[in-house]
Amino acid sequence: MKLDVLKYPDARLRLKSAPVERITEEICRLAEDMVETMYAEDGIGLAAPQVGRPLRLVVVDLSGPSRREAATVYVNPELEILGEETQESEEGCLSVPDLRAVVKRGARVRIKALNLRGEELVEEADGVRAICLQHECEHLEGRLFLDRLSRLKRNLYNIKRKKILTGDDA
Ligand code: NI
């Protein structure tokens, strides 16, 4: 089932998510619905707080919405940035409509999480995958990529967003 994605400035996007205590059938269904939602919205990643569930659960599929062949589910992910090297790339977010902006992040990461069978998975990533994992895990802390932009860029976006939300975007 496709879920509704919360949009900035919805206050629920700012909640710190709680750990998943037990991988129940409900959690598995939520993960499945999140993958479906990510595909339907043309995204490559989605975090549970974006669908109004403040839980530490993230889905990623870098193969993209058209191929849909490599969805990974991360339960209670712990992300570590490896080394000092950084990379910059243009990001967007399903919860932050009409904004793409260049963000600087760590070049390499290690992520530890559980899969839906409760097995521990450890993965090292670089490139787009490292960016995506950092972006999604930030959602679990109530942070958005927007927070990493300059105040000027954020203000411009806030003005644009307000106009759209009040229907005053002529
Ligand atoms: Ni996002």
Image (spheres, helix red, strand yellow):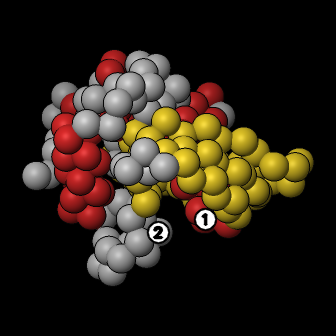
User: 9 or 3: nearer the eye?
Assistant: 3
Label 2: element kind: loop
Q: Secondary structure at mark 1?
A: helix
Q: Earlier in the sequence, mark 2 or mark 1?
A: 2
**Place of residue 17 in the rendered image (x, y in percent of width and height, measured from the top left):** 43, 24
Task: Give the residue type at disc 2.
Answer: Leu
Going 19% across and 28% down the picture, which residue do you hit? 166
Residue 128 relative to residue 167: left or right: right
Can you say whether 67 is above or below 51 in the image?
below
Residue type at tag 1: Val
Q: Whole-percent x and y of residue 161?
A: 33, 35
Q: Residue 128's mark?
A: 1
Which image quadrant for residue 167? Answer: top left
Describe residue 71's horizontal placement relative to residue 165 as left or right: right
Q: Which mark is residue 146?
A: none
**Residue 112 visible in the shown view:** yes
As measured in the structure, the alpha-carbon distance from the residue carrying label 2 to the one carrying label 1 is 8 Å
Q: Nearer the viewer, residue 26 or 59?
A: 26
- Point 19% across, 37% down: residue: 26
Image point (86%, 54%), residue name: 85
Residue 48: image location, x then y, percent: 34, 37
Looking at this view, name the residue that lies furthest to the left: 1
Question: Quick check: is the Cβ at mark 2 less than 8 Å away from ligand 1?
Answer: no
Between 37 and 159, the one nearer to me in the picture: 37
> Is label 2 in contact with label 1 (beta carbons under 8 Å)?
yes
- Per the image, the residue denoted by label 2 is 62
